[in-house]
Amino acid sequence: MDAYELLTRNVEEAVTDEEVRDLAAEPEGKRAYVGYEPSGVLHLGHLLTANKLIDLQEAGMEVVVLLADVHAYLNEKGSFEEIRATAEQMKAQFLAYGLEEDQTEFVYGSEFQLEEEYTLDLHHLERETTMNRAQRAMAEIQGDETAKVSHLVYPLMQTLDIEYLDLDLAVGGLDQRKVHMLAREKLPELEYDVRPAIHTPIVADLTSGEGKMSSSEGITISMEDSTEDLEEKVNSAFCPPTRDPEGDLENPVLELFEYHVFPRFDEVVVERPEKYGGDLTYEAYEDLAADLESGELHPADAKGTLAAALDELIAPGRETLRELRS
Ligand code: IYR
């Protein structure tokens, strides 16, 4: 797979495609990042962007994981000490999941966001940005009439992070796009360079196939799930025998194969007894989706295979969590 494909496979959008193409032409040593508000246990949303980081590492890029402790503090996720403790756990789970230790830099926001230069730049940015503009940037993450001043500062800091971490590419879920757009608008006003961004899709709710699942709603799969939990969750997932169900619905089982399984396995084997046609081996998501649609692959067999693959992916992180807690 060439670098451009590694950078853009399974992304919902590249902003801009041309800038990402330029980056892909010379990816070695270039720096990409994702920022995460620390939380104790990784879930599918974290793992989707982590998969992209693994792609970028394969393309030769350096990866920065920002453990956004100050952002989590602004967002009232706990006391600063609590947030720091969950950040440590988060880091351990990312490494267990497969980020390359020698190609990944973990940075706490508080390591640089409380420095004088950053703070003055932040105040500069506050002067350049209307409250209305900052609030619009937060609409996806934390936006309504009850927004606090902290919620306006939040996207401005995220904007400065891109400069202060010396990045060439910002990565995030589609829910980060408004903040990245603000960053593209504002960085040049401080005479800093604009950087491209790529956004990963947000996966539909597992049981209904509706809307877009984020960490806080619906059933998600997390590093904490036991093998049995995974089987149960996947078994109860919505899986019509089509990749494009009617209306706004998605097929979450296929989405998980596409975004979580195929990027991490060279091939996927659906084990079936001889009398049901024997094993099926897939090297590409498209072939599996086509077989589900044609009826060659039964949803129950697809689910069993999905649960086993997810189990394999989260097993090391689950073990790490267990050790951290014992
Ligand atoms: N807004 C993110 C967390 C975050 C991301 C980046 I990229 C930063 O520079 C800082 C914070 C979230 O919603 O989790």
Image (spheres, rainbow, N blue to C red):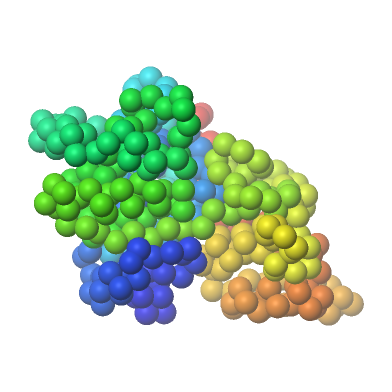
Look at 58% across and 54% down and name the residue there.
203
| Residue 102 visible | no
Q: Position of residue 301 (x, y in %)?
A: 78, 65
Q: Position of residue 236 (x, y in %)?
A: 78, 49
Query: Does residue 193 appear left or right of residue 7 in this picture?
Result: left
Q: Position of residue 137 (x, y in %)?
A: 37, 43
Q: Is residue 325 above or below residue 275?
A: above
Q: Is residue 81 above or below residue 142?
A: above
| Residue 23 visible | yes
Displayed quadrant of residue 57: bottom left
Look at 26% across and 77% down and name the residue there.
25
Q: Nearer the viewer, residue 263 or 293?
A: 293
Look at 78% across and 68% down and name the residue there.
241
Q: Nearer the viewer, residue 324 or 29?
A: 29
- Residue furthest right in the image: 275
Q: Nearer the viewer, residue 238 or 148?
A: 148
The tally of labels here is 0
In which quadrant will I find the N terminus?
Answer: bottom left
Query: Does residue 164 appear left or right of residue 265 in this picture?
Result: left
Q: Is residue 179 above or below residue 83?
A: below
Look at 62% across and 77% down and name the residue there.
286
Displayed quadrant of residue 93: top left
Displayed quadrant of residue 62: bottom left
Q: Position of residue 165 (x, y in %)?
A: 21, 48
Query: Does residue 306 appear left or right of residue 168 in this picture?
Result: right
